[in-house]
């Protein structure tokens, strides 16, 4: 979702996420964890990394939820790929 500052994007996206099964991803919240805040002059490489993190986080959350919902009495073991 995109729009001008203070147009209600965050408020609307939170309500949509609450009422549906859609994931809500906030680039601002990801950047704030890194110490960047709306209005800061955030470098392009930080935005690119934030985008990658958002896509990966959403993919992992949806994959884990889908996988976990299919488990019935199985033990999940994680192994490191080499």
Image: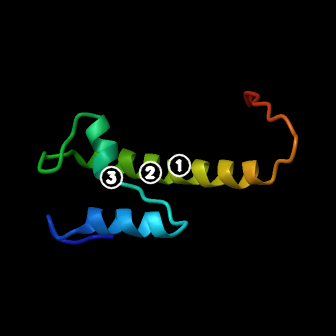
User: Is label 1 in a helix, a strand or a loop?
Assistant: helix
How far apart marks 1 and 3 lie (CA) works out to: 13 Å
> To which residue does mark 2 refer?
54
On screen, residue 60 versus residue 5, left or right, reads right
Q: Which residue shows up at 80% across the image and 31% down it?
A: 77
**Residue 7: % across, % down:** 17, 70
Which residue is situated farthest in the front direction here? 19
Front residue of 44 and 75: 75
Residue at the spot 36% in from the left edge and 62% down from the top edge: 14
The answer to whether mark 3 and mark 2 are in CB contact below 8 A is yes
**Distance between the alpha carbons at the discs numbered 1 and 2:** 6 Å
Circle 1 packing at 10 Å, graded few (<14), some (14-19), many (20+), is few
Where residue 80 sits, quadrant-wise, is: top right
Name the image quarter holding residue 74: top right
Toward the viewer: 14 or 6?
14
User: In the rendered structure, are the residues bearing label 1 and label 3 in contact, judged by CB atoms less than 8 Å apart?
Assistant: no
Which disc number belongs to residue 56?
1
Give left or right: position of 39 versus 63: left
User: In percent of the image, x 26 and y 40: which residue is there?
Assistant: 32
Q: Earlier in the sequence, mark 1 or mark 3?
A: 3
In the image, is residue 50 above or below residue 18?
above
Residue 62: horizontal and vertical position, in percent? Answer: 61, 55
Left or right of residue 21: residue 81 = right
Residues at discs 1 and 2 in contact (Cβ within 8 Å): yes
Q: Quadrant of the C terminus?
A: top right
The spot of residue 37 in percent (x, y) is: 18, 43
Q: Residues within 10 Å of mark 3 (few under 14, many from 20)?
A: some
Residue that label 3 marks: 27
- Measure the C-alpha gap from mark 3 to mark 2: 7 Å
Q: Is residue 6 left or right of residue 61?
A: left
List x then y, in percent, for residue 10.
28, 62
Report the number of numbered marks.
Answer: 3
């Amino acid at each position: 979702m995109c729009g001008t500052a203070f147009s209600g994007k965050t408020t609307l996206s939170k309500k949509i996420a609450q009422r549906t099964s859609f994931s809500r991803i906030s680039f601002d919240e990801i950047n704030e964890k890194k110490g960047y805040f709306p209005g800061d002059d955030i470098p392009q490489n930080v935005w690119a990394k934030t985008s990658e993190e958002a896509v990966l986080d959403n993919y992992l959350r949806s994959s884990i939820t889908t996988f976990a919902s299919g488990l019935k009495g199985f033990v999940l073991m994680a192994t490191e790929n080499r």
